[in-house]
Image (cartoon, rainbow, N blue to C red):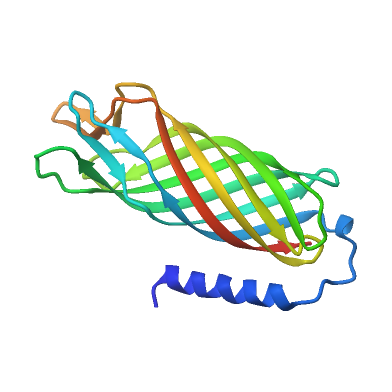
Amino acid sequence: MRPGTRLYALLLTSMAVAAVMPAPAAAADELKFEITPFVAYRFGGTFDDEGSTASYSIDDSEAFGLLFNVRQSSNTQWEVLYSRQAANASLRGSLATVPSIDMDINVLQIGGTYQGSGETVRPYLALTLGGTYIKTTANGTQSDTFFSGSIGAGVSLIPSSRLGIRLEARAYGTLMNANTDLFCQTGPDLNICAIRIDGSLLSQFEIFAGVVFRF
């Protein structure tokens, strides 16, 4: 069984247990911290190729991550987000035969959430800012880091218990300078760029489910 499949199975089992467990006697305001491992499916992401009508499109794929939350008030939390997507970028709109580029997209951001009211279902909004670190497997190229942000909306199930579920849809935006050469390595005998882009914003969207551990 692949690691991703095992993680899906673990999360689905934990979510099923959380759904049938009775809420503990501990008061909700005593639970200050949350750790939420999650699995996601991420869509979108396009790099426009400089000097042509072609573009590199990031294939839709799985993503994994971890959220850490600290309660600030009855309806607000600080939030730290880490996520990782292993994906391919494929060339579109060109007659040239170019192999797809493997890349790892790592996101680390900090922000907060604003939660509504509810005993078993609690809606919330999330906003985070930070950086996106992108690395390709193209020979000789380097990684690059860009400023990014995300905004999400979702629901927290069983929000007063030590074990719950978090369901969310989140949009990511990564800022890039126009006419940027991505993942380049230069030198006396080498000048390689995996992708040359003409654009300013890389946009992606994901849906995810996670198991919330509160303490």
Total marks shown come to 0
Is 96 situated above or below 175? below
Residue at 80% across, 66% down: 161
- Report the quarter where the N terminus lies: bottom left
Residue at 23% in and 30% down: 49
Would you place residue 20 above or below residue 207 in this image?
below
Q: Position of residue 121 (x, y in %)?
A: 75, 59
Residue at the image position 64 percent from the left and 51 percent from the top = 154
Q: Quadrant of residue 15?
A: bottom right
Position of 12 compared to 100: left or right? right
| Left or right: 182 as drawn, with respect to 132 | left
Name the image quarter holding the C terminus. Answer: bottom right
Is 91 left, or right, of 129 in this rendering?
A: left
Residue toward you, 59 or 105: 59
Q: Nearer the viewer, residue 12 or 32?
A: 12
Q: Is residue 116 above or below residue 147?
A: below
User: Which residue is nearer to you in this view: 212 or 20?
Assistant: 20
| Horizontal side, residue 51 vs residue 28: left or right | left
What residue occupies the far left of the structure in this picture? 96
> Residue 174, how many percent across, how many down?
45, 33
Residue 106 in picture, x, y percent from top left:
46, 46
* Residue 207 x, y percent position in the rendering: 52, 54
Classify residue 54 by image quadrant. top left
Residue 150 in the image: above or below residue 101: above
